[in-house]
Image: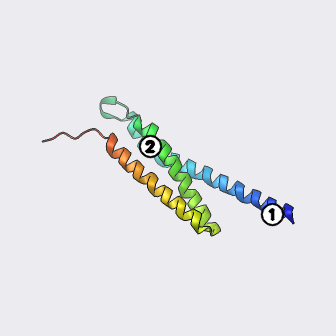
Amino acid sequence: MEIQNSRRDAVVGTAGCLTAFAGALAGIVLWAPHGKGGLLDGFEGASNWNVLWVGLPLMILGGIAAALAVFFLVRGDWKRARGLVAANARLIALGVVGDAQSRAPQPEW
C-alpha cells in the first residue's frame, strides 16, 4: 500500500513540475513581443534593458504562478490556489509600477 501512495505522489509532483515549466514557457512567449520591441526598437536605436532584467523575470514568475494556481484549483487545493493568485496579483502590480517608472519622462508643454 505504501508503494502505491509514493508512486501517486511522484506522479502528482511530476505533473506539478511540468505545469510550472509550461507556465514559465508561456511567460516567455507572452513576453517576447514586448521584449523585442523594448530591446530592438527603442528610440533612436537605444535599447531598454529594463525590459530584459525586470520584465522577463516577472513574466516567468507570473506564468509559473498562474499555471500552478490552475493546477491547484484542478486538484481542489483552494488555499494554495488563493495564495498563488495573490502572488500573481503582486507580480502584476510590480510589473505595472516598474513599467511606469522605466518610461522616458514626457515633455511638459
Screen quadrant of the N terminus: bottom right
Residue nearest the viewer, comparing 38 with 97:
97
Secondary structure of the residue carrying tag 1 is helix
Say whether residue 90 is left or right of residue 73. left
Screen quadrant of the C terminus: top left
Q: Is residue 96 above or below residue 75?
A: above
Structural crowding at the residue carrying mark 1, measured as other residues with C-alpha within 10 Å and reported as few (<14), some (14–19) or many (≥20): few
Q: What amino acid does circle 1 point to?
A: Asn
Q: Residue at the far left: name it.
A: 109
Q: What amino acid does circle 2 point to?
A: Gly
Which circle, 1 or 2, is nearer the viewer?
1
Which is more N-terminal, label 2 or label 1?
1
Across and down, in percent, residue 52 comes to 45, 37
Structural crowding at the residue carrying mark 2, measured as other residues with C-alpha within 10 Å and reported as few (<14), some (14–19) or many (≥20): many
Residue found 41% across the figure and 44% down from its top: 34
Q: Which mark is residue 26?
A: none
- Residue 71 visible, this angle: yes
Across and down, in percent, residue 60 comes to 52, 47
Residue found 50% across the figure and 61% down from its top: 85
Q: Which residue is mark 2?
A: 55
Across and down, in percent, residue 104 comes to 28, 38
Q: Residue at the far top: name it.
A: 45
Specify the quadrant of the image occupied by residue 76.
bottom right
Residue found 44% across the figure and 43% down from its top: 55
Q: CA distance from mark 1 to mark 2?
A: 40 Å
Secondary structure of the residue carrying tag 2 is helix
Q: How many marks?
A: 2
Q: Which mark is residue 5?
A: 1
Q: Are marks 1 and 2 in contact (CB under 8 Å)?
A: no
Residue found 61% across the figure and 52% down from its top: 20
